[in-house]
Image (cartoon, rainbow, N blue to C red):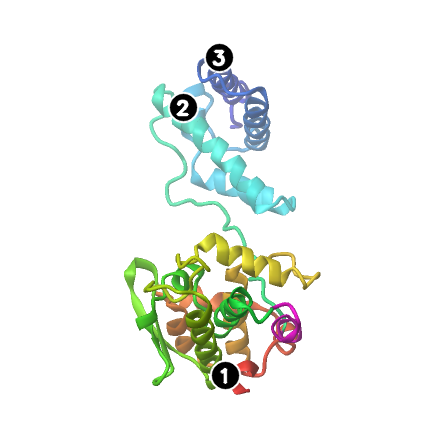
């Protein structure tokens, strides 16, 4: 037996009226729900093996039918977002049916929509990063020395913007060449740094003592002695990375991506990189291994600035 065609469209019409007149949804939203649900109704009208009674028809719409519809939508080359939007409309429709006791259960048990593909992380190529750091974009005054160190530190250690802002003077161990940062959920970790970065840290300290009279505990400060904010760090990074016209995203996190991509491309163990980044699981770090091999070959050789 075929699904009773009138029953499904009747309930869809009732639901659309409910959204329009009782929930006062916008015309655009109501039309979107109506279109999605009418598409579903058209799909299931040809399904066989369903009872004739209207309520029984709706009860026989199970997860297998919804899954078949989802697969049909994906065959039509719809985006993941579009498929999930249609499934969300169907979920809302069945919640309405359950609330009005038209059906006893919804067909979404053990069923989830297609996962949205995560975009590959943005990163800066080695040659472009060298041009930014070795160019004439920084002056020798306090702000110039500080800004260069901020970009260099983000690039060479992969720390988060919030972690950089939270660094205090006591967190920088120049003798052991270790940096202590406080990450998410107040977890602290030690990050080693190379001799070249040590020289830059010492130079910044000297310039800060000479040009800025302050007793601030914060390592990165403004000229008036107040700690730098995340907004200031974002501004500095965006301004310096704007010299790379091919880069569509410019933020401190891009430098974090660049660090991780470069380390993995240079042969670093993924678990070691994960610890350096402060990730709680390898799953968060594995995204960097998805960058194509051809792109990876162009990025880093281990980490060139740490070798200098």
Which residue, given by chain and number where applicable, does mark 3 sit on? 21
Residue placed most toward the observer, 35 or 81: 81
Q: Secondary structure at mark 2?
A: helix
The quarter holding residue 43 reads top right
- Label whose residue precedes the other's in the sequence (1 or 2): 2
Which segment did they paint magenta? 126-138
Would residue 43 be counted in the magenta stretch?
A: no
Label 1 vs label 2: CA separation? Answer: 64 Å
Q: Is residue 136 visible?
A: yes
- Label whose residue precedes the other's in the sequence (3 or 2): 3
Judge left or right: residue 127 versus residue 103: right
Which residue, given by chain and number where applicable, does mark 1 sit on? 196
Mark 1 and mark 2 residues within 8 Å of each other at the beta carbon: no
Residue placed most toward the observer, 85 or 104: 85
Q: Secondary structure at mark 3?
A: helix
Residue sitting at x 35%, y 22%: 99
Residue placed most toward the observer, 187 or 149: 149
Residue sitting at x 39%, y 65%: 213
Residue 96 is marked as 2
Q: Nearer the viewer, mark 3 or mark 2?
A: 3
- Label whose residue precedes the other's in the sequence (1 or 3): 3
Residue 95, how many percent across, how many down? 39, 27
Q: Main secondary structure of the magenta part?
A: helix
């Amino acid at each position: 037996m075929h699904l009773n065609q009138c029953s499904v469209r009747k309930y869809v019409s009732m639901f659309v009226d409910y959204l329009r007149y009782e929930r006062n949804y916008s015309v655009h939203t109501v039309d979107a729900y109506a279109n999605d649900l009418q598409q579903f109704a058209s799909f299931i009208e040809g399904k066989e093996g369903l009872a004739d009674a209207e309520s029984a028809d709706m009860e026989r719409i199970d997860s297998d039918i919804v899954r078949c519809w989802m697969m049909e939508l994906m065959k039509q080359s719809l985006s993941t977002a579009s498929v999930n939007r249609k499934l969300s409309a169907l979920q809302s429709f069945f919640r309405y049916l359950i609330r009005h006791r038209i059906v006893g259960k919804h067909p979404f048990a053990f069923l989830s929509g297609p996962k949205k593909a995560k975009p590959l992380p943005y990163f800066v190529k080695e040659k472009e990063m060298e041009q930014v750091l070795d160019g004439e974009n920084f002056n020798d005054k306090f702000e110039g020395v500080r800004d260069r160190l901020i970009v260099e530190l983000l690039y060479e250690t992969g720390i988060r913007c919030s972690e950089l802002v939270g660094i205090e003077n006591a967190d920088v161990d120049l003798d052991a060449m270790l940096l202590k940062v406080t990450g998410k959920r107040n977890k602290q970790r030690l990050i080693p740094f190379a001799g070249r970065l040590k020289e830059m840290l010492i130079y910044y300290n000297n310039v800060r003592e000479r040009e800025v009279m302050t007793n601030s505990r914060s390592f990165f400060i403004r000229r008036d002695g107040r700690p730098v904010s995340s907004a200031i760090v974002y501004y500095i990074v965006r301004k310096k990375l704007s010299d790379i016209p091919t880069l569509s995203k410019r933020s401190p996190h891009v430098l974090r991506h660049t660090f991780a991509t470069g380390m993995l491309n240079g042969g670093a163990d993924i678990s070691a990189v994960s610890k350096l980044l402060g990730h709680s699981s390898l799953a968060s770090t594995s995204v960097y291994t998805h960058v194509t091999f051809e792109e990876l070959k162009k990025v880093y050789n281990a980490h060139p600035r740490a070798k200098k």
